[in-house]
Image: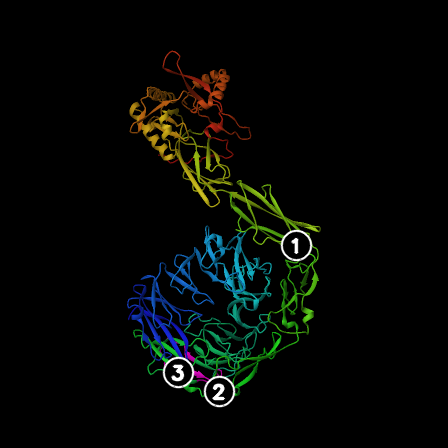
């Protein structure tokens, strides 16, 4: 079948039935079609005779059912769960009899992965494609939602003896803005009231790791990720790494023996890691090995980069000392190998296979002590060419070459024998078998026709005596399974006479980790069947302590002579974090005994820490930060502050936290693990400080916290029409009015870069006529809003303030779109009743109540080249025509059926603004003289009645190096003629009005646009 390949999942079951032991094998095969990009068929197979025969179970699960995964309860092998392909249907099949029969249950969600409880056989967590976590306590028959927004693979079952309850779940959940939170939930009740928050603040996404007694998280602080750890579910503290270690990545390798081994990629590393080891249940880490590029858990073999070459090292004392591997003395043909350290040694590929059906590059078994099989090369460095297979029988002291090509090697009979299969893309029909730890190999044929081998199936555990090889005779043939039963070649069950003793050593040194270890292993060429856990016990006796049994303590570094001396950044006199005055502590000598080291006496007292009384010290190393790791918080919500003191915490040491808003809190001789919570009731920037003090001194630390609220809107205000070369003030209004620190971005017409200010006002000067687009963006925290408007610039124009009949106010919704519509209908009405060109009228409806507007009469484009006097006279004629129509109530519109709105001019109406630099306006001087005489009267009238005359325009500007002063502007104020309805004009010098009445404020930013031609609409 072209474009199709098969994948499979296999499970074994050791089911005891009276005296007879039945081996059940379940196999799920799937056919993937490359043309469609999906699985098109699946088959379920079951064997009850250890793989000799298989029964196809498709009819029992449904002929059209496509299965995707097979799960076995780790606590009860009789319970099986099958998942269907979610692209076809969402359901699962449950078997309680080793897969003989199934019950199908529909699902309301798609399962991405399952996590079985380590002790309760019916408890299961299911993770869905939409980041929801479900729980079942009935082995999948019923499901209940636990929580939404769960981070993939960041959920863990509780452990009895560590967590408060057995039915508890550890979760990392996603919150807004790319942050996560660590919570705990009860099994079937994860409501807000039942949630626990072991760490009060936010954590870095995808950072929660719950492993044995430890919980690891990363906390964002000051733009960096700080690694925190909790031991036995107690409070979190920062992992104490060497001072200038700045991890880019940190992977927990092991937490065995209550000791953490971590692989850390430091800030200057790209392709390598350093190995660090912690003290027993402590938070301080010391360096084990630098520049590790690969490694395996529990095996002290590591690859290290040395002068751009990858070399393999081995350690026998848990990372304290590392040595190059000794190359074999002869090759496979018996020729002498000339390889002298450090220029030449054996280097191994240390990749453990993720495929359960292949052996990987390196294998070892607990039941086969001392035996390690790996692929590698002999030479100056590790390479991928000329790879051979090597084996050691003495835990890495000496090595032998067993194959000069790549082979997959499997343990048989609990490590008593070895099976090798050539790793090749070509078809094969032979395997090799060894009974003397790989020294000699016997060749066996397992099939009459060559087989393309895809993998090897072996019984779980190490007591394998039956193997199944699967593959294809050709790329288009069906599955072929070949069962190999090795039981016939073993002569008897092993007895004590079949074993010999073997002593673990490191280059002849028998004291390893403070003990002499004598192990038992099978004699070579003995063909007996090993019983499970038979004769693998070890005898041991402790050794006197020497310097080799101690590693450097935190803050100390190994010197060339082997001694431990303080690092340049470490102060040896510094005591531990929780050393309280009056108590005692263990003062380090620079050494600490390696964990699990069992040496006694000897030099134990010389290198062991000495107990001393905690001295009285002045506070030092005080830290304060928010639990979220940010310097921004929301108004009215709890802010949690975390305070840490490295040194000087004693019975007389008090810590005071001043929140900067007039309130503070103090505590003595204690720490608040959950943090200190405080709520701010006003927007602003607060100076938060923490002070630790005792009789010997004090330490103080501060931070500046920005309290803001959500910005909902920004509104830009500016005149719709302005005079060329005259300063114009732009102002903004935010809602709510007080939101904290606002950053304004001003985009001026087609400029590519904005002007950034902290003030919501700006002064502009437009050098050319035209239409300019102004945009302002207001930014508060992560929220940005913007407003935009167009300003028309002319040499001169006339304007009038308009009012409306009161019925319009009742229907004014206060939105900009409504005002734009009113502008349009008012302008249309004016054009209709006056005959004035629409190009010469601009109408702007102003925000607020009562509803008012302003109409601008601007010159015609074709008449701008004429004399100034003619242009002025023409605008004056149009103004008189418009005022006449307004006074006769001719300008009106229908808002809705039955609602007629009249538009009229107010008592005071702005008149023409002209360019005072134009010399042809000689009448301007006369007007100014008359205005001086009437100045006093004008000031009195305007300031007394200015709130009644909203139509009066004011124009201000700032003069460099001078106090702000009034710029006189020629304005015509219309007043009624006592002799009739005809309007006359009284010229006067306008004065600066209250800027707040129009929303214009003095600007601290005065920008003049360039002479580039504006975009004209």
Dividing the image into 4 quarters, which one contains the N terminus? bottom left
Q: Mark 2 — residue?
A: 526
Give SS at disc 3.
strand
Q: CA distance from mark 1 to mark 3?
A: 69 Å
Sequence-wise first label, 1 or 3: 3
Circle on res. 280 = none
Dividing the image into 4 quarters, which one contains the C terminus? top left
Circle on res. 649 = 1
Discs 3, 2 touching: Cβ within 8 Å: no
Give SS at disc 2.
loop
Whether 1013 is among the magenta residues is no
Q: Who is closer to the viewer here, 188 or 432?
A: 188
Q: Who is closer to the viewer here, 878 or 669?
A: 669
Give coordinates of residue 219: x percent, y percent.
53, 55
Give coordinates of residue 778: x percent, y percent.
46, 40
Residues shaded magenta = 420-441
Give coordinates of residue 779: x percent, y percent.
47, 42
Residue 871 visible somewhere in the drawing: no
For residue 904, above or below residue 785: above
Q: Mark 3 — residue?
A: 485
Whether 429 is among the magenta residues is yes
Give SS at disc 1.
loop
Give coordinates of residue 295: x percent, y percent.
51, 69
Magenta stretch, main secondary structure class: loop
Within 10 Å of disc 1 (Cα), the crowding (few <14, some 14-19, many 20+) is: many
Residue 639 visible somewhere in the drawing: yes
């Amino acid at each position: 079948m072209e474009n199709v390949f098969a994948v499979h999942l296999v499970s074994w079951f050791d089911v005891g039935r009276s005296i007879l032991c039945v081996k059940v094998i379940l196999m799920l095969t799937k056919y993937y079609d490359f043309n469609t990009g999906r699985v098109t068929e699946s088959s379920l197979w079951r064997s009850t005779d250890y793989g000799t025969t298989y029964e196809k179970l498709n009819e029992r699960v449904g002929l059209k059912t496509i299965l995707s995964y097979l799960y076995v309860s780790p606590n009860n092998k009789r319970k099986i769960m099958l998942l269907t392909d979610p692209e076809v249907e969402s359901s699962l099949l449950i078997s309680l009899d080793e897969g003989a029969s199934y019950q199908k249950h529909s699902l309301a969600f798609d399962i991405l992965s399952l996590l079985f409880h380590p002790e309760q056989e019916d408890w299961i967590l299911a993770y869905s494609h939409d980041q929801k976590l479900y729980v079942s306590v009935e082995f999948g028959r019923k499901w209940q939602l636990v929580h939404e927004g769960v981070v993939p693979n960041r959920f863990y079952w509780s452990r009895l003896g560590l967590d408060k309850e057995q039915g508890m779940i550890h979760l990392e959940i996603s919150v807004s803005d790319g942050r996560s939170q660590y919570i705990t939930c009860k099994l079937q009740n994860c409501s807000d009231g039942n949630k626990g928050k072991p760490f009060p603040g936010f954590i870095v996404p995808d950072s929660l790791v719950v492993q044995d007694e430890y919980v690891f998280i990363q906390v964002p602080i000051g733009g960096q990720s700080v690694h925190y750890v909790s031991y036995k579910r107690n409070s979190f503290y920062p992992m104490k790494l060497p001072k200038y270690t700045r991890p880019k990545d940190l992977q927990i390798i092991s937490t065995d023996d209550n000791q953490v081994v971590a692989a850390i990629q430091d800030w200057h590393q790209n392709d390598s890691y350093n190995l660090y080891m912690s003290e027993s249940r402590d938070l301080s880490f010391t360096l084990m090995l630098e520049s590790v590029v690969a490694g395996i858990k529990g095996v002290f073999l590591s690859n290290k980069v040395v002068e751009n070459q990858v070399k393999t090292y081995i350690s026998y004392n848990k990372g304290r000392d590392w040595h190059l591997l000794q190359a074999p003395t002869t090759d496979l043909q018996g020729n002498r190998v000339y390889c002298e350290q450090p220029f030449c040694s054996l280097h191994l590929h240390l990749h453990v296979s993720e495929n359960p059906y292949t052996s990987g590059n390196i294998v070892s078994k607990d039941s086969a002590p001392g035996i390690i099989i790996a692929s590698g090369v002999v030479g100056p460095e590790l390479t991928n060419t000329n790879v051979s297979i090597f084996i050691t029988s003495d835990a890495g002291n000496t090595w032998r070459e067993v194959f000069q090509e790549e082979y997959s090697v499997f343990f048989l009979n609990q490590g008593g024998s070895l099976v090798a299969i050539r790793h090749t893309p070509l078809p094969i029909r032979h395997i090799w078998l060894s009974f003397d730890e790989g020294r000699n190999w016997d060749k066996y044929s397992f099939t009459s026709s060559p087989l393309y081998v895809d993998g090897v199936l072996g019984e779980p555990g190490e007591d394998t005596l039956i193997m199944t090889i699967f593959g294809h005779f050709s790329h288009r043939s069906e599955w072929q399974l070949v069962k190999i039963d090795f039981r016939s070649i073993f002569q008897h069950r092993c007895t004590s006479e079949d074993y010999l003793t073997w002593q673990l050593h490191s280059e002849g040194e028998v004291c390893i980790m403070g003990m002499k270890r004598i192990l038992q292993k099978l004699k070579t060429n003995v063909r007996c069947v090993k019983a499970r856990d038979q004769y693998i016990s070890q005898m041991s006796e402790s050794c006197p302590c020497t310097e080799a049994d101690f590693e450097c303590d935190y803050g100390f570094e190994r010197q060339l002579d082997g001694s431990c001396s303080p690092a340049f950044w470490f102060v040896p006199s510094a005591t531990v974090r929780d050393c309280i005055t009056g108590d005692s502590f263990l003062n380090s000598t620079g050494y600490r005994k390696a964990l699990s080291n069992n040496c006694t006496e000897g030099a134990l007292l010389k290198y062991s820490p000495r107990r001393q009384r905690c001295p009285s010290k002045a506070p030092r190393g005080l830290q304060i930060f928010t639990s979220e790791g940010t310097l921004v918080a929301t108004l009215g919500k709890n802010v949690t502050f975390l305070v840490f003191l490295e040194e000087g915490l004693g019975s007389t040491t008090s810590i005071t936290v001043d929140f900067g808003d007039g309130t503070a809190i103090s505590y003595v001789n204690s720490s608040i693990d959950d943090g200190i919570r405080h709520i701010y009731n006003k927007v602003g920037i607060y100076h938060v400080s923490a002070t630790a003090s005792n009789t010997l001194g004090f330490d103080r630390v501060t931070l500046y916290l920005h309290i803001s609220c959500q910005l909902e809107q920004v509104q830009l205000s500016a005149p719709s029409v302005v005079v060329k070369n005259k300063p114009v003030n732009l102002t903004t209004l935010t809602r709510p009015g007080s939101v904290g620190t606002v950053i304004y971005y001003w985009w001026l017409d087609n400029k590519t870069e904005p002007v950034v200010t902290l003030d919501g006002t700006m002064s502009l000067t437009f050098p050319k006529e035209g239409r300019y687009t102004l945009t302002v963006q207001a930014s508060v925290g992560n929220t940005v809003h913007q407003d935009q408007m167009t300003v028309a610039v002319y040499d001169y124009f006339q304007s009038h303030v308009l009012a409306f009949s009161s019925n319009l106010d009742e229907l004014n919704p206060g939105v900009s779109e409504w005002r734009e519509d009113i502008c349009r209908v008012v302008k249309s009405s004016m054009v209709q009743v006056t005959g004035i060109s629409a190009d010469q009228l601009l109408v702007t409806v102003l925000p607020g109540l009562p509803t008012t507007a302003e109409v601008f009469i601007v010159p015609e484009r074709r008449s701008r080249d004429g004399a100034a006097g003619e242009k002025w006279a023409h605008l004056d004629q149009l103004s008189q025509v418009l005022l006449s129509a307004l006074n006769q109530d001719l300008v009106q519109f229908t808002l809705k059926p039955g609602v007629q709105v009249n538009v009229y001019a107010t008592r005071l109406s702005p008149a023409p603004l002209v360019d005072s630099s134009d010399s042809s306006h000689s009448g301007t001087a006369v007007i100014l003289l008359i205005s001086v005489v009437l100045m006093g009267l004008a000031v009195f009238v305007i300031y007394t009645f200015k709130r009644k005359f909203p139509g009066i325009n004011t124009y201000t500007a700032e003069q460099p190096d001078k106090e702000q002063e009034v710029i006189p502007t020629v304005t015509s104020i219309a007043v009624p003629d006592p002799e009739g309805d005809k309007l006359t004009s009284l010229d006067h010098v306008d004065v600066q009005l209250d800027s707040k009445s129009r929303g214009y404020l003095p600007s601290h930013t005065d920008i003049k646009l360039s002479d580039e031609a504006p975009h004209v609409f």
